[in-house]
């Protein structure tokens, strides 16, 4: 496990998120289209 920067959806109803390394340039949620915000999560190493 490691701390990883991720972008998560700012919509409280949506659970969308993506690792910073795999994020698209527009930073819109791929599930609902809302803005994404940066946070840190503990995730498995890949």
Image (cartoon, rainbow, N blue to C red):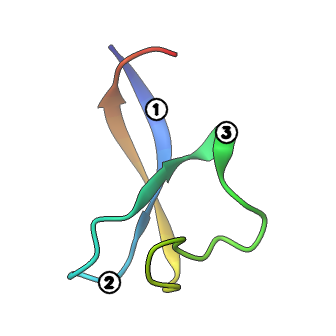
Up the image or down, 37 lies above or below 42; here it is: below
Callout 2 crowding tier (Cα within 10 Å): few <14, some 14–19, many ≥20: some
| 32 is higher (above) or lower (below) than 1 | below
**Precedes in sequence: disc 2 or disc 3:** 2
10 Å crowding of disc 3: few (<14), some (14-19), many (20+): few
**Residue 7, image x, y percentages:** 49, 57
Q: Earlier in the sequence, mark 3 or mark 1?
A: 1
| Furthest-left residue in this view | 13
Front residue of 5/16: it is 16
Q: Where is residue 40, by image quadrant?
A: top left
Confirm or deny contact between disc 2 and disc 1 (CB under 8 A): no
Q: Is residue 21 left or right of residue 33?
A: right
Residue nearest the observer in this picture, 25 or 4: 25
Task: Calculate the distance from the C-alpha at mark 2 to the C-alpha at mark 1.
Answer: 21 Å
Residue 9 % position (x, y): 40, 71
Residue under the image location 45 percent in, 74 percent down: 31
Q: x, y percentage for residue 45?
A: 45, 14
Taking the spot 32% from the left edge, 13% from the top edge, the residue there is 1
**Which residue occupies 33% across, 38% down?**
41
On screen, residue 22 above or below 28: above
* Disc 3 secondary structure class: helix
Disc 2 on helix, strand or loop?
Answer: loop
Residue at 49% across, 86% down: 34
Q: Are marks 3 and 1 in contact (CB under 8 Å)?
A: no
Q: In the rendered structure, find residue 4 and report the number of the disc placed on it.
A: 1
Q: Which residue is mark 2?
A: 11
x%, y% of residue 3?
39, 26
Q: Earlier in the sequence, mark 2 or mark 1?
A: 1
Q: Which residue is mark 3?
A: 21
Residues 14 and 37: in front is 14
């Amino acid at each position: 496990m490691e701390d990883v920067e991720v972008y998560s959806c700012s919509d409280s109803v949506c659970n969308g998120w993506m690792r910073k390394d795999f994020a698209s340039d527009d930073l819109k949620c791929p599930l609902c289209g809302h803005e994404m915000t940066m946070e840190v999560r503990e995730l498995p190493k890949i």
